[in-house]
Image (spheres, grey):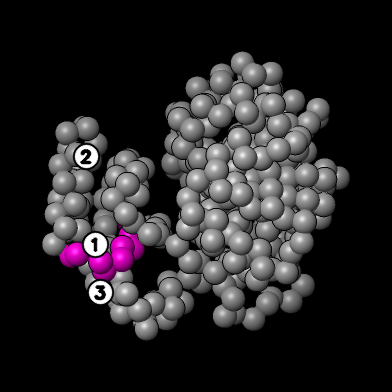
Amino acid sequence: MGYYEFNVELAVEARDALLGLATGSGCLGVIEKEKGLIFYYPDRAGIDKLTSDFVVFKNILKDSGLPCDMVFSYEYIAERDWNESWKKKFQPIDIGENISIIPPWELSREKRINLIIDPGMAFGTGHHDTTKTCIELIAKISSQGTKDRFLDVGTGTGILTICAMKLGFREAVGVDIDPLAIDAAMRNIALNGLKNVTIKEGTILAAAGAFDVIAANLMSEILIAIAPEIATRLKKDGIVILSGMIIGQEEEVIAAMEKEGLHFRDKFYDGIRWVTMVLTR
């Protein structure tokens, strides 16, 4: 099997909508870049259908009142060239004072906490602003002594779960509704040699028990919908890290969380677009 790589340039305001449309059309993975997005599709989808889909996406953006000046191009990648293609695009990332995200083909960085992530086909390589901020907050929280149970809702590649465990948490659970994400997370857990980690396919309902820290890097609509389940699973004095919201959406999320007994503590702006929040019980 081969793959098609679609390079799409479009306005920042339209990216979330396009992500949703592309994911629903069989997209296997996405890389966010400065001026747009890179989508990957299996070649069995057929290039005529894929190019037609992107024309339809452009019209949907226009009908929704979003910027629709979208430009795309595509390239075929043979299966034998797949790994090399990923290697060219995935570069190590340093976060904070001592955390590095590295792919498995790179040497570990001395005197740093190395999170080994095979990009695979799931969200969460560490390049996205929201992922970086979540990692920084997990590092800060773990330095304050809260290191028992960690829950990662929408785990993707498992990067936040891996980060929590390498920063001293005793146990972690990651859940995701995407089978590809489950496969990627389990593979990355193994690459990092971690124990006491459980990865489950499903929503937050798949996570049993109470947690000291819960992280959810998801769209605002999902965060609002799962607010009761987050509150139910948070220990007394526990901490919630919420991200994935566009600036301007946070007040609705805060209201949903406070309705369930949580208390807003702080928020952080990730560039010009995203916001990450911390809440407590």
Give the x, y percent position of residue 15. Answer: 33, 46
Which residues are drawn in magenta? Answer: 35-47
Residue type at mark 1 is: Ala
What kind of element bears circle 3? Answer: strand
Q: Which residue bears the numbered disc 3?
A: 76
Q: Earlier in the sequence, mark 2 or mark 1?
A: 1
Q: Earlier in the sequence, mark 1 or mark 3?
A: 1
Residue 41 highlighted magenta (yes or no): yes
Can you tell which mark lies on residue 45?
Answer: 1
Q: Which residue bears the numbered disc 2?
A: 61
Between 244 and 180, the one nearer to me in the picture: 180
Can you tell which mark lies on residue 206?
Answer: none
Disc 1 versus disc 3: distance between alpha carbons? Answer: 12 Å
Does residue 128 sit above or below 276 in this rendering?
below
What kind of element bears circle 2? Answer: helix
Disc 2 versus disc 1: distance between alpha carbons? Answer: 22 Å
Between 199 and 98, the one nearer to me in the picture: 199
Give the x, y percent position of residue 206. Answer: 62, 40
Residue type at mark 3 is: Tyr
Q: Residue at x 61, y 57 (%)?
A: 159
Give the x, y percent position of residue 215. Answer: 64, 42
Label 1 neighbourhood size at 10 Å, few (<14), some (14-19), many (20+)?
Answer: some
In front: label 2 or label 1: 1
Q: Earlier in the sequence, mark 2 or mark 3?
A: 2
Label 3 neighbourhood size at 10 Å, few (<14), some (14-19), many (20+)?
Answer: some
What kind of element bears circle 1? Answer: helix
Hey, which residue is sitting farthest top in the picture? 259
Q: Residue at x 25, y 74 (%)?
A: 76
The reply to whether dot 2 and dot 1 touch (C-beta < 8 Å) is no
Q: Residue at x 81, y 55 (%)?
A: 168
